[in-house]
Amino acid sequence: MECFQAFIDEPDVVVLEHPKTAFVSKENVKVIASSQAVTVLSIERADEYTLYLQLEEEVILGEEMYLVVEDSYIPIDPRHIVWTDWFERHYTAKAEELGPNYTAEKTTFRVWSPTATQVEVCMWNKRFPMIRKTNGVWQLEWNGDLAGVTYQYAVTINRQQQLVNDPYAKSMKANSECSVVIDLSKTDPAAFRQMPSPTVDKQDAVIYELHVRDATSAATSGVQHKGTFSGLTEKHTTTENGFSTALYYMKELGITHAQILPIQDYARVDERNPSMQYNWGYDPLFYMVPEGSYATNPDDPSARITECKKMIMAFHEQGIGVILDVVFNHVYAYEHSVLEALVPGYYFRYYQDGSISNGSGTGNDLATERVMVRKLLVETIDYWLEEFQVDGFRFDLMGLIDVETMTAISKRCQACSRPVLLLGEGWEMETAIASDKHKKASLSQASALQNISFFNDQYRDVLKGNLFDQEQKGFVNGNGLFHDRIAALIAGSADNRFGNPLFSNPLQSVNYVECHDNLTLADFLVRSNPEVSEEVRKKMHQLATGLVLLSQGVPFLHAGQEFFRTKKGNENSYNAGDDINQLDWLQRVEENDNVAWIRQLIALRKQYPHFRMVNSDKTKAYLHIIPAPLPVFAYMLIGPSEDFTIFINPTNEMKMAKLAALGRWEKIVSNHSSTSATIHCTDQLPIELAGYELAVWKKNRR
């Protein structure tokens, strides 16, 4: 009966597919398992090829089961049963500590694989059987010190056995060849646990998005360990002519947080020969393992952990927090992933017809709404918070993650004694999630996730033009286009004076005009405004970047944005190599005046709470739009000791404007001046705005 296939899709139903004949009946069929014989109560034919066999009792997973028809034995394989609420109730193991629980005296291995009929731990080319618990967790206790020992699991499911790495492993050999037992206490750099983390609240944050390799790989970086975690620990690095680079440069710039593109173990870079490939890291393999291509020795399982901790510690020493970019919406090549191998069909979303969901565009979507998937993600967050002392997380394609999971992550982070920043991409994505049971953590659900910030694509597109429309321009490069939408953005997209707010509070708005994705702002302006000079495009660039730093909400800069970073027109440089992606430190030297101006804006934002209001009540009280000749945009920030007026002229023409109140006003910042001293003072109301000028005026109340 080779053509017969039998599956468990419901706890008390066997599905028999492709029967050649109709001779199967209740009288000549039975179900047997190693621990039970199950009576078939009835048989229902769904169609010409499918029979449903109703069983007298529910099956027990983790055993070999067979459908016996006359003298033929047909294996029964678990299938869609893992999608059911019944499976969640009977086989979740929320309280179990999975992975290797190491002490010098004993290591306990635990892995969750409810549909497996056998699991063994493989060490020293030998196999040691694990004991199965009723919740589907397999366990083995091993006496003795296993630190540094490599291991895998030999998992048998549906009569097929394969070697599988541990999804809860803390380190790997190079290229994820096998899992390694680690004594984490020996991976801490000296004084790592005593080093205080920066305590920067979200309203005070200035985020700087960085790729580990990009930061130091250029020959001009002055860094010894280029492209590695260690490269970002080196202090006082400079170009040949003495201009700061890498960590030293970021400290001088004044940013509060480095948001680092994925550093959890990922695919498509040979860790032993990283110079042969390049990748941003959005191909996750093992969530708790630092990426080996950033280690000085990828074959030393402890080195990648220690060097990652040293990098984080080096940022902390400079007062800079570290935000990890985490990819919780998909995994690399799901059909070959350890998650699929351990519990086939469980960790990923499927449509009812059995086709896999692919809202991520990478071939799969993680089923974050399922209990054991959520457990893995929340415990990953917990691990990086506690073991590596990170300061925040950026969630890739957060709109594919369910609200309940993001709420659980938020609660865990709020329990920290230090501020933990959470932000993500809330794009509305098509995915196979039951919307009546689970809500996606998209922008539409921002009110339910008030401690999480969202990338504000309206901010990006209004300022420079729609990302995906090559013909459209925006406010800074379109002579004030969308002028009527600027007020809402300046107020953090949370003030109902300016239309329906996107967010409940300004701190939910991540304000940006450039990130690792798509064209850099400099490259975008070349495409959108080819008719103007490079100098004019730089002025447009300054308006956009300046507004990011002066708006309410959380400002976000892409590394190198402050010196007009270019990727030579490449709008998807995820694998384009160092030549396209590396930070050009010579360009940083050439554009030092602009770097100084951005540094001045960051310092201004840090110094005055006017630019860092935490709720819309404050913006309504202290932020006011003032008249200005169109399309100039002007607004005033009122404070107890100082008032500020900000003017933005998005045209190439000189404009005359009026300050909002009498008194002695000082022009303290302008993109037309490199000085950090007062540029101009006036007791008169009319002022002159140069073409493409962003100017900040200040008046002391006392």
Image: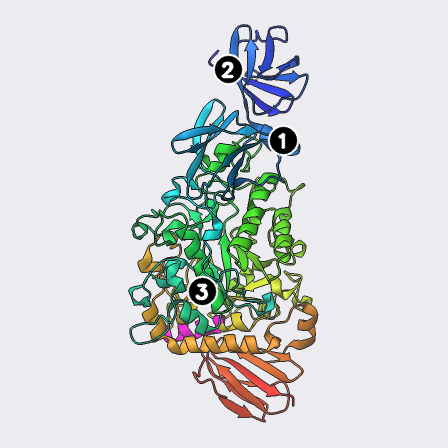
Q: Residues within 10 Å of mark 3 (few under 14, many from 20)?
A: many
Q: Secondary structure at mark 3?
A: helix
Q: Main secondary structure of the magenta part?
A: helix
Q: Which residue is mark 2?
A: 4
Q: Determine the residue positioned at 50% across, 73% down.
A: 546
| Sequence-first tag of 1 and 3 | 1
Q: Are marks 1 and 2 in contact (CB under 8 Å)?
A: no
As measured in the structure, the alpha-carbon distance from the residue carrying label 1 to the one carrying label 3 is 46 Å
**Residue 616 appears at what percent x and percent y?**
68, 68
Q: Is residue 342 above or below residue 320?
A: above
Q: Which residue is mark 1?
A: 87
Q: Amino acid at mark 1?
A: Phe
Query: What label sits on residue 314 in the rendered view?
Result: 3
As measured in the structure, the alpha-carbon distance from the residue carrying label 1 to the one carrying label 2 is 25 Å
- Residue nearer the viewer, 537 or 450: 450
Examine the structure image and report whether residue 540 is included in the region drawn in magenta: yes
The reply to whether residue 282 is visible in this rendering is: no
Q: Are marks 2 and 3 in contact (CB under 8 Å)?
A: no
**Residue 349 appears at what percent x and percent y?**
55, 38
Q: Is residue 338 above or below residue 192?
A: above
| Sequence-first tag of 1 and 2 | 2
Magenta residues (range): 534-545
